[in-house]
Image (spheres, coloured by chain):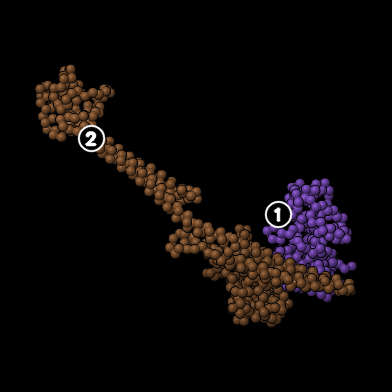
């Protein structure tokens, strides 16, 4: 019995459909062959009979009855294998000439055409003949016929071929369909089974490939690659969650112990007030961390890309520079600005501003007094480049990837305030804008460049 | 001044009602959106504070309904949704200001005061005056006690905002949003630096300082008499 799974398989349904269409086309083809061969033969027989009757009638007209009898006799004598039939009778249907012993019985349909089976005429086997009846002047009856056994044989052959051909199509097609579906089902089942196991929690499981390089292998490879990526992302999420937990635990712990201490000790109102103020500062820091995380998540989801508008980078950078210039000056830094005019990129103003603010923030924070900071915006064949450079300690090449991760804070910066999210946000904003983020050595210091590729910018 | 609060978080509402009453406001509070719709239609309030997420009718619908009914009472929208897009949606719906939870009470108070002054101080005068500090909006000049003070364009905008809100507290976020059009907090105190530079320009050499820092809240430009 064919299992229901196989019956429900789309491959089987498809092959049955295919088989039906194929069978139909075989049927049409054979029918066409049949009608063009058998039909042609039939028409040819009729034409021959017509021509003969016409010839005989003319003979009768020219040579009279005796002439006609002589012609018929000579034709019968010439026809050795009995493929032609002739009979001429008088008005009482008494035979006068021909190779039929008696007047054949037939139903007159008005056209004079009829088919008959001749039992045994002069040692020949029974055969089918096509005949035409014709009335000659003087009430003489004439019948001329042709043996059509050959034609009927050909017809039967074609009919047989038609039948067997169809049968073969159905059988082979059906069997092929079942086999193909079974094979497909088996391969799909392997994938289904593997994915079910993965869904049940075994993330290390992979879909087996047969090494044939066929479409199933390709599908399996793609699914496996997708799984690898999911695992990587999950590990990333786990890492981030751990980091968040770790980074929030510190301030939360400080808040808790501060409040606890002021609760258990009897302190002066001033001291309690100081604790509360410290608490609010800590909570504000936590909120800032949360906001940064949310902004990064939103940028990374890419959902904001649909709201992109054309951003005037020149004025955006000028605004940010205007905001940070006094701060840099206050910190004893030289701030230089070099902005090419009128450069535009499609983007999100808010995120770009924040990313640039973070970069300037970092530059001001990490560059020691007496150093310098520069903000440049240039346009080149590669695109529009926005760069913030400083003369601070810089970031060693081996750490440049790492600092883009959330909560990464290098040992050297442990003593400066910050959440370790600033550059992560810059990286997320760069990703959202499909801009290339490069951290390079400013010798000394750090140079951070955001390159908006030429294909995506307008100037 | 009558303040109408629509907030379904009872504890947050109680805290807000208490704080605003202590600041001298007459406060009414409902927790349900549908009831809020009846109240804003029936009563005349000076300012409405509405939470965005409410049972039955949400905050944005309340604001939209008020505006389509021709009610021009200033509205401050409170929301836990802090995305810029959410903010834009809130302001588009007809809100006059948008404050993200959690907020400092001082921030809420400062913004409410700013909303209440709107329409009174926004009169298109060409001259702003606080004590002996004068700002000519047409000539874009600033003088203190008759002496011209040179200001950069952003400093001018900053001082203009402070003068328009003279006598009241203006928070750092309000300055960032209104003067710089940034809706995020930079990590370092950039605003403090800008304000202290401005203070240096307008107060230095004068007996009476006009620009003062309000601890835990922001700044205030006032005539200390």
Q: Is residue A180 above or below residue B136?
A: above
* Whether residue A44 can be seen here: no
Q: Is residue A415 above or below residue A60?
A: below
Check the residue under mark 1 and report the chain it is in: B
Give the residue at x 49% y 56%. A188
The numbered mark at residue B92 is 1
Can you give x and y, in whole percent of width and height, for residue A273 in the image? 85, 71
What SS does tag 1 mark? helix
Colour chosen for chain A: brown
**How far apart are labels 2 and 1 at the CA level?**
94 Å
Chain represented in purple: B
Give the residue at x 87% y 55%. B26
The quadrant the C terminus of chain A occupies is bottom right
Can you give x and y, in whole percent of width and height, for residue A178 in the image? 43, 50
Please determine if labels 2 and 1 lie on a single subunit. Answer: no
Give the residue at x 30% y 40%. A160
The image quadrant of residue A135 is top left
Which residue is tagged 2? A149
A347 relative to B145 in the view: left or right: left
Give the residue at x 35% y 46%. A168
A11 relative to B175 in the view: left or right: left
The numbered mark at residue A259 is none
Q: Is residue A78 above or below residue B91?
A: above
Q: Is residue A137 above or below residue B74?
A: above
Q: Label 1 crowding class (10 Å Cα cut-off): few <14, some 14-19, many 20+? A: few
What SS does tag 2 mark? helix
């Amino acid at each position: 019995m064919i299992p229901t799974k196989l019956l429900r398989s789309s491959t089987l349904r498809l092959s049955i459909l295919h088989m039906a269409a194929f069978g139909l086309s075989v049927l049409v083809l054979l029918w066409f062959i049949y009608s063009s061969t058998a039909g042609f033969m039939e028409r040819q027989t009729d034409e021959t009979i017509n021509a003969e009757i016409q010839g005989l009638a003319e003979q009768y007209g020219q040579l009279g009855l005796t002439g006609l009898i002589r012609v018929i006799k000579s034709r019968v004598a010439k026809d050795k294998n009995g493929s032609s039939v002739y009979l001429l009778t008088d008005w009482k249907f008494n035979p006068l000439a021909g190779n039929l012993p008696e007047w054949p019985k037939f139903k007159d349909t008005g056209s004079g055409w009829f088919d008959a089976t001749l039992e045994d005429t002069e040692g020949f086997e029974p055969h089918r003949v096509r005949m035409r009846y014709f009335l000659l002047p003087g009430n003489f009856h004439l019948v001329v016929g042709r043996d059509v056994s050959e034609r009927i044989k050909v017809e039967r052959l074609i009919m047989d071929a038609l039948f067997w051909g169809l049968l073969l199509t159905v059988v082979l097609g059906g069997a092929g369909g079942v086999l193909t579906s079974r094979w497909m089902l088996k391969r799909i089942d392997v994938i289904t089974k593997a994915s079910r196991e993965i869904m049940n929690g075994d993330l290390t499981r992979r879909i087996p490939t047969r090494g044939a390089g066929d479409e199933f292998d390709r599908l399996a490879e793609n699914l496996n690659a997708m799984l690898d990526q999911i695992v990587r992302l999950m590990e990333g999420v786990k890492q981030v969650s751990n980091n968040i937990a770790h980074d929030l635990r510190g301030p939360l712990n400080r808040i808790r112990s501060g409040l606890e201490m002021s609760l258990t000790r009897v302190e002066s109102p001033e001291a309690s007030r100081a604790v509360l103020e410290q608490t609010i500062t800590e909570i504000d820091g936590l909120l800032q961390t949360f906001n940064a995380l949310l902004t990064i998540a939103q940028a990374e989801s890419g959902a904001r890309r649909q709201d992109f508008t054309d951003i005037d980078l020149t004025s955006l950078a000028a605004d940010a520079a205007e905001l940070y210039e006094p701060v840099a000056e206050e910190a004893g830094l030289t701030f230089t600005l070099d902005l090419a005019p009128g450069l535009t990129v499609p983007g999100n103003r808010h995120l770009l501003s924040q990313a640039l603010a973070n970069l300037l923030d970092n530059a001001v924070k990490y560059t020691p007094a007496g150093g310098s900071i520069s903000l440049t915006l240039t346009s080149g064949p590669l695109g529009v480049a926005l760069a913030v450079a400083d003369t601070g300690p810089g970031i060693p090449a081996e750490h440049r990837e790492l600092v883009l991760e959330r909560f990464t804070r290098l040992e050297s910066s442990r003593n400066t305030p910050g959440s370790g999210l600033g550059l992560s946000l810059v990286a997320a904003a760069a990703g959202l804008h499909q801009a290339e983020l490069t951290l390079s050595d400013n010798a000394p210091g750090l140079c951070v460049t955001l390159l908006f590729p030429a294909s995506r910018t307008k100037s | 001044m009558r303040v109408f609060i629509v907030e379904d978080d009872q504890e947050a509402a109680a805290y807000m009602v208490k704080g605003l009453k202590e600041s001298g406001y007459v406060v009414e509070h409902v927790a349900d959106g549908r009831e809020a719709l009846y109240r804003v239609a029936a009563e005349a309030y000076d300012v409405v504070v509405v939470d965005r997420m409410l049972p039955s009718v949400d905050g944005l619908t309340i604001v939209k309904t008020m505006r389509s009914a021709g009610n021009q009472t200033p509205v401050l929208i409170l929301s836990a949704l802090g995305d810029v897009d959410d903010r834009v949606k809130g302001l588009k719906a007809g809100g006059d200001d948008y404050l993200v939870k959690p907020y400092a009470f001082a921030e809420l108070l400062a913004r409410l005061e700013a909303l209440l002054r709107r329409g009174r101080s926004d009169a298109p005068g060409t001259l702003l005056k606080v004590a002996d500090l004068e700002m000519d909006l047409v000539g874009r000049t600033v003088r203190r006690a008759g002496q011209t003070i040179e200001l950069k364009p952003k400093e001018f905008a900053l001082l203009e905002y402070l003068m328009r809100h003279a006598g009241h507290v203006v928070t750092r976020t309000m300055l960032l949003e209104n003067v710089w059009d940034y809706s995020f907090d930079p990590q370092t105190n950039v605003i403090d630096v800008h304000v202290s530079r401005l203070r240096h320009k307008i107060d230095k050499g004068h007996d009476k300082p006009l620009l003062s820092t309000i601890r835990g809240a922001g700044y205030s430009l006032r005539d200390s008499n």
